[in-house]
Amino acid sequence: MSTKSPKHIAVIMDGNGRWARQRGLPRSRGHLEGANSARQCVEACLEIGVEYLTLYTFSTENWRRPKEEIDTLMGLLQKFLKDYTADLCRRSVKLEAIGRLQEIPPSVQRQLRESIRATADGKNLTTILAVNYSGRTEITEIYVTQKLWPDFRKQDLLEAVQEFGRRNRRYGGI
């Protein structure tokens, strides 16, 4: 890649439900496909040398969804962590988490702690899961795409990084 890669990329994983609805599928399928997009982004970050990837996975506002969907999301997070931790270790990816973690189900908290412990020695990429988070002040620069999260793949992240590299930032200056 010819453009400079950012040190840190943060992704708000949005659009899973709309993606599923557009295809006549249950919302849970959109969330499952979204997990595949997360894997693709980790892979892309490893390839281009990004140091930190933050994935905004579940906001405090998501608690307003139906209980069944919340249970599905928490179960998917737990399963994703259980199934993907060995691969993260193999790729030397360190996993961290931020947010109000004490408010998520205890079984998910346990799996999250286990995955964080297992990947603690990762050196190639630090992936941070923002779980039960809120606050727009956490987001500095933003890239917006029309693509819904489950359709987002490695090439899309690479295109976003190229756009990042072309930007002229003045941060309030002239």
Image (cartoon, helix red, strand yellow):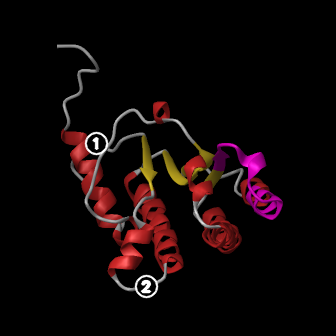
Give the quadrant of residue 156.
bottom left
Q: Residues within 10 Å of mark 2 (few under 14, many from 20)?
A: few
Residue 162 horizontal/vertical position (percent): 23, 49
Instruction: Give the residue type that dot 2 points to.
Output: Leu
Is 162 or 136 nearer to us in this picture?
A: 136
Q: Which residues are magenta?
A: 96-112
Per the image, label 1 sits on a secondary structure element best described as loop
Q: Residues within 10 Å of mark 1 (few under 14, many from 20)?
A: some
Please state the total of marks drawn on the protein image: 2
* In the rendered image, the vertical position of residue 63 relative to residue 173, given as above or below: below
Instruction: Give the residue type that dot 1 points to.
Output: Lys
Mark 1 lies on residue:
4
Is 172 or 29 nearer to us in this picture?
A: 29
Mark 2 lies on residue:
25
Q: Residue at x 65, y 43 (%)?
A: 99
Q: Residue at x 38, y 86 (%)?
A: 24
Residue 72 horizontal/vertical position (percent): 64, 73
Note whether residue 60 is visible: yes
Per the image, label 2 sits on a secondary structure element best described as loop
Mark 1–mark 2 distance (CA, rounded to whole Å): 38 Å
Note whether residue 85 is visible: no
